[in-house]
């Protein structure tokens, strides 16, 4: 194995709790639950010998892995890991109209239209392009054998399609709860998801 990636989604924000889409243009903080999730993840994986931490440019990812950064692990932000931009619908109330707009968009994606986007937003195809660039950056650092990657829900699902060779219309098959972990190996240029949808660390949270 050339490299092992621990890929997680950021912890919960208040907009997550309210069911409001954030996207690339909303730079929200973690809420109390998100901070607890981040602490639980750190407590579980603090002894993993990470060589590098990669995050998106949005602070909810930074905050989720801040304890690793504070421990002295080198950190790099990659804009390619940012969330899909939802355009003019980012931060809008979770109304029936909004839910219908998103439902129709996701249906377009399921039907194979990966260029579909909301006004001012991005398409899955565009996000896949910048994710590929981020992956190339991560893969090129041969000296980094074990890395931690913190990113976003929709972008994570698109990334997992790329890693597993699945078409983008299967992105909904990948669970993406806050701080969920996917452990991925890279060997000879081939990625393999070796530990999917791991939420063991969340057992540390009290109900």
Image (cartoon, grey):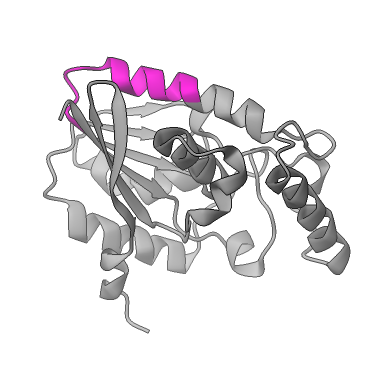
Q: Which residues are magenta?
A: 132-146
Determine which quarter of the picture holds residue 5: top left
Q: Vertical placement of 204 versus 92: above or below?
A: below
**Residue visible at 44% across and 23% down?**
134
> How far from the left and from the top, in percent, is residue 13?
54, 59
Q: Let me know if residue 135 is in the magenta part.
A: yes
Is residue 135 positioned above or below 7 on the image? Answer: above
- Left/right placement of residue 73 relative to residue 134 reads left
* Any part of residue 90 in sight: no
Position of residue 62 measured from the top left corner of the image (x, y, whole percent): 41, 42
Q: Residue at x 53, y 40 (%)?
A: 158
- The residue lying toward the viewer, choosing from 151 and 154, is 154
Where residue 139 sits: x, y (%)?
A: 31, 21
Q: Residue at x 55, y 23 (%)?
A: 130
Quadrant of the rendering where the C terminus is positioned: bottom left
Above or below residue 188? Residue 181 is below
Give the quarter of the image for residue 169. Answer: top right
On the rendered image, what quadrant is the N terminus found in? top left
Horizontal side of 193 relative to 19 (left or right) equals left
Does any portion of residue 203 appear in the rendered image?
A: yes
């Amino acid at each position: 194995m050339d490299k092992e990636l621990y890929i997680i989604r950021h912890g919960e924000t208040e907009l997550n709790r309210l069911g409001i889409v954030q996207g690339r243009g909303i730079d929200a903080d973690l809420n109390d639950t998100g901070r607890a999730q981040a602490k639980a993840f750190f407590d579980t994986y603090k002894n993993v010998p990470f060589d590098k931490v990669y995050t998106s440019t949005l602070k909810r990812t930074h905050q989720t892995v801040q304890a690793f950064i504070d421990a002295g692990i080198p950190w790099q932000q990659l804009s390619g890991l940012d969330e899909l931009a939802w355009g003019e619908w980012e931060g809008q109330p979770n109304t029936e109209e909004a839910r219908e707009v998103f439902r129709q968009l996701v249906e377009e994606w399921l039907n194979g239209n990966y260029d579909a986007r909301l006004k001012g937003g991005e398409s899955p195809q565009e996000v896949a392009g910048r994710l590929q660039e981020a992956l190339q950056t991560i893969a090129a650092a041969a000296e980094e054998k074990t890395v931690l990657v913190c990113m976003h829900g929709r972008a994570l699902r698109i990334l997992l399609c790329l890693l597993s060779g699945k078409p983008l219309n299967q992105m909904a098959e990948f669970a993406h709860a806050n701080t969920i972990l996917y452990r991925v190996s890279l060997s000879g240029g081939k990625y393999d998801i070796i530990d999917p949808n791991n939420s063991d660390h969340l057992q540390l949270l009290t109900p």
